[in-house]
Structures are given as structure tokens and as C-alpha cells.
């Protein structure tokens, strides 16, 4: 393989695309003594910018609640621009869905923790995520949905 045909994967830029912090029940919420229940949602999306450059955004949403009351909500969109060249088409989706989120995750974890601290709360430390497992679970769900018989509607 010549150098021109060798696969290329490089990080062009890492940046925060979106950051939102909400503390809707401040200042009264700071007087609460209970520990809130924390839920974390995560998703990634890739979009081509041109033939060999892609933007991948890992969005992490952390919501803390005390019963029905929202203590805080922090959402961060950590993005990166990646150059991908001479990669077989079948390897492109796993690269964008596994490798890129793995690169973005530590940055997203830091942004979330910092935002929660700046909002006046104890840091939320996101546990490591296996993006490969998430990718294959998503593929299984898509395949199951595609092979499920379509429901007929009667009018």
C-alpha cells in the first residue's frame, strides 16, 4: 500500500458545541439535605462535513432530582472534527460511533463535572462507558426493528 492509500484517522479539533446548566429551584434547593437521584443520558451523532472530514458530537445530559423537583440539569455537547481517509466503508460507522466517542468522553466528563461544581453542587463523576457495547446494542435493536413484521391498520 502506498502512503496515499494508507488509512488516515486524525483529530482536527475538539470543542464544546453546546453547554447548558439549569438550577430551576435555586436558591431554596441549596437548603435541601437529601442526596438527589442522578440520571445520565448519552448519545452520539456524526455528520460529514466533506468527503473525509466528520463532526462527531457526544451529548451527555445529567439530571438530578429530589422526588419530582429538579435539583439541576446539565447538558454538554462535546464535539470533535475528525479526518478519515482511505478507511473501508464498512469500518467508517464503527470508527465514528466507537473510536470518536471514546476520544470525546474524557472531555465531556470534565465539562459535566466542572459545570455541576460551578452550579454549586458536588461533582458528578461519570463512570467509564463501553461505546463498543452500546454500538452493537444499537445495531441489534435496529436489526430487530427491521425484521419485525409491520402492523396492519384496519380502517
Image (cartoon, rainbow, N blue to C red):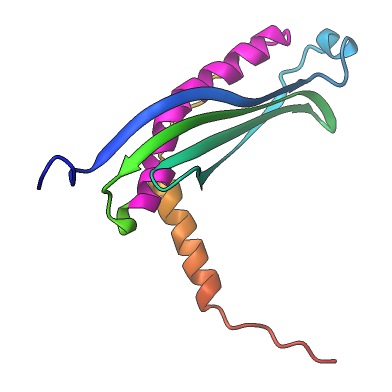
Secondary structure mainly formed by the magenta segment: helix
Q: Where's residue 71, x and y in %?
A: 79, 22
Residue sitting farthest toward the bottom: 155
Q: Is residue 31 above or below residue 71?
A: above
Magenta span: 92-121
One can see residue 124 in this view: no
Q: Residue at x 41, y 48 (%)?
A: 51
Residue 121 at x, y = what percent?
Answer: 70, 11
Q: Quadrant of residue 128?
A: top left
State the residue at coordinates (48%, 30%): 80
From the viewer's perspective, is 74 left or right of 26?
left
Q: Position of residue 50 (x, y in %)?
A: 46, 45
The C terminus, quarter of image: bottom right
In the rendered structure, does residue 108 fall within the stretch colored magenta?
yes
Q: Residue at x 45, y 63 (%)?
A: 140
Q: Quadrant of residue 114?
A: top right
| Residue 148 to residue 3: above or below | below
Identity of the residue drawn at 58% across and 16% down: 113
- In the displayed structure image, the side of residue 84 where residue 50 appears, left or right: right
Q: Is residue 93 left or right of residue 149?
A: left
Vertical placement of 26 versus 127: above or below?
Answer: above
Nearest to the observer: residue 95 or residue 126 = 95
Viewer-side residue, 52 vs 149: 52
Instruction: State the image coordinates of residue 119 (x, y, percent, origin top left).
Output: 73, 11
Instruction: Examine the rendering and report whether any part of residue 34 can be seen.
Output: yes
Amino acid at each position: 500500500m502506498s502512503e496515499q492509500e494508507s488509512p488516515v484517522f486524525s483529530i482536527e479539533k475538539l470543542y464544546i458545541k453546546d453547554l447548558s446548566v439549569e438550577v430551576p429551584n435555586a436558591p431554596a434547593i441549596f437548603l435541601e439535605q437529601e442526596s438527589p437521584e442522578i440520571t445520565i443520558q448519552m448519545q452520539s451523532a456524526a455528520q460529514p462535513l466533506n468527503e473525509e472530514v466528520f463532526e462527531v458530537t457526544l451529548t451527555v445530559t445529567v439530571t438530578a432530582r429530589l422526588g419530582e423537583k429538579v435539583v439541576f440539569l446539565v447538558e454538554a455537547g462535546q464535539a470533535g472534527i475528525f479526518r478519515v481517509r482511505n478507511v473501508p466503508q464498512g469500518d467508517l460507522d464503527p470508527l465514528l460511533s466507537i473510536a470518536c466517542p471514546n476520544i470525546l468522553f474524557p472531555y465531556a466528563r470534565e465539562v459535566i463535572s466542572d459545570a455541576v461544581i460551578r452550579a454549586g453542587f458536588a461533582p458528578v463523576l461519570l463512570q467509564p462507558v463501553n461505546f463498543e457495547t452500546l454500538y452493537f446494542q444499537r445495531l441489534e435493536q435496529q436489526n430487530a426493528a427491521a425484521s419485525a413484521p409491520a402492523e396492519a391498520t384496519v380502517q
